[in-house]
Image (cartoon, rainbow, N blue to C red):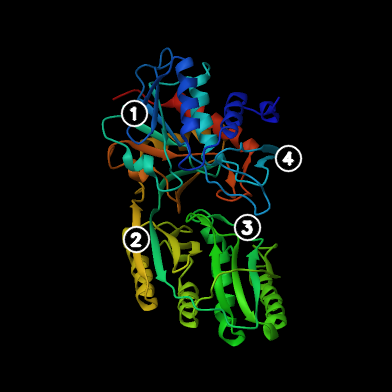
Amino acid sequence: MSELSQLSPQPLWDIFAKICSIPHPSYHEEALAEHILEWAKEKGIYTERDQVGNILLRKAATAGMENRKPVVLQAHLDMVPQKNNDTVHDFTTDPIQPYVDGEWLKARGTTLGADNGIGMASALAVLADPSVEHGPLEVLLTMTEEAGMDGAFGLQPNWLQGEILINTDSEEEGEIYMGCAGGIDFITHLPLVRELPPVGYQTLKLTIKGLKGGHSGGDIHLGLGNANKLLARFLFEQAQALDIRILDLNGGTLRNAIPREAFATLLLPAANVEQLKALSQDYLAVLKNELSAVEKNVTVLVEASDSNEHPLTQDSRDRLLALLNATPNGVIRMSDEVKGVVETSLNLGVVTMEDDHAEIICLIRSLIDSGKDAVVGTLTSLGQLAGAKTSPKGGYPGWQPDAHSPVMALVRETYQKLFNKTPNIMVIHAGLECGLFKKPYPDMDMVSIGPTITGPHSPDEQVHIGSVDLYWKLLTALLKAIPPRA
């Protein structure tokens, strides 16, 4: 028996355990989608899919609730696939291995997928549990949220019947979200030239690792180390003085995750090897001092290596390092309107190098469109200075807060009655799908709630078990309290 079966509420945790057993990283949600459709059909629940693969499940109101406003419970099907460097795991074939650690549920060496698996499990548990009272109910499960919000972009008007949408993708119990940042990807393609390797040089691998990583929206204000930026900074400072030649440079794996690890394969004159090792440890001491409050385990490693690659020319090396070092990262501006919330940010998420070019992928987020536009302009300018091609793509809108939202007021009132305390009404600096839903459904009243999840988009992801029980109590009480149709 799974240890998750011992947790409360049991129907939710049993469904989450099943979700963990079926691989569902972004772009590979089909097996989970098929399982959910079969599960729903066995229970006599109406099922439908749209042209992009979104799942819609419908259930009639429980007795006496037929006149209530129809509600949509919404979650996304995919999870972020991140693992520790020493973890052997294929996200397309291997199940997630959850385990209980005190008050928290974690996964062995990988992301847990509580983002948004707990939300998905809660919506399905509502459908499965006959004791939950609700009006006309729909469950919308969207495709590929974590890699571009494909399902939300593809959602068509006149498909959903609900008047109220409850998004389950928030990650702090006791907080109600009424707005979120929009975002846009920014891709820089820098041409590179290689040359024959010089004689008498040694091959070394320089690695920055041990950083926490995290969500590039929800965690961007924490001042966490970005492995790509830290690696570029060191190489920019030392490359010319030590005659470092670059064979390869890579860091990060996802645009929406703060990169935990980055490495460079280098050629170096044999006479300079010991100096590089000494300087790397000096740099480690600098990082430990600068990041002492947030990054206890940062490591800088220099190891012997081998490679058949040709090094970059000195000009290509200098342009690449200058571009990476000059690219902004982190919080760009705090909001004037919503105190304590980031308005605009940038995550230098992924750096990859091929034979003749480097690709840099950033994710820009902002509560206001002009904030996104300003950072796009900055990155475009840097690309022009470096001789790179740049392209913004995949932009999605923010979710404009509505201070007069009836469902937000209802959630606040319900929370107050249940727990005898007032929840925080928040705007989140991350991308929720609600902003995109507003285009085909402009009149739908929306709110976002969820349990406490820390470290999403990283192998440190964990969900607080007690908060899931509180979230479930809030969700089921909220469904019972939905008012009648006007």
Q: Nearer the viewer, mark 2 or mark 1?
A: 2
For residue 212, the mark is 3
Looking at the rendering, which quadrant does residue 262 occupy? bottom right
* Cα distance between the residues tagged 3 and 1: 40 Å
Give the image location of residue 364, x and y in percent. Answer: 41, 60
Q: Secondary structure at mark 1?
A: loop
Left or right, 33 with respect to 107, comes to left
Asked if the residue at tag 4 contacts the one at tag 2, i.e. Cβ–Cβ closer than 8 Å, the answer is no
Give the image location of residue 91, x and y in percent. Answer: 57, 42
**Residue at x-position 42% and y-position 49%:** 431
* Cα distance between the residues tagged 3 and 4: 21 Å
| Up/down of 433 relative to 290, above or below | above
Q: Nearer the viewer, mark 2 or mark 3?
A: 2
**Residue at x-position 50% and y-position 54%:** 254
Give the image location of residue 137, x and y in percent. Answer: 40, 23
Circle 4 sits on which residue? 102
Q: Please report whichever mark, 2 or 3, sits nearer to the chain's N-terminal start.
A: 3
Circle 2 sits on which residue? 392
Res. 342 in view: yes
Q: Amino acid under label 3?
A: Lys
* Cα distance between the residues tagged 2 and 1: 34 Å
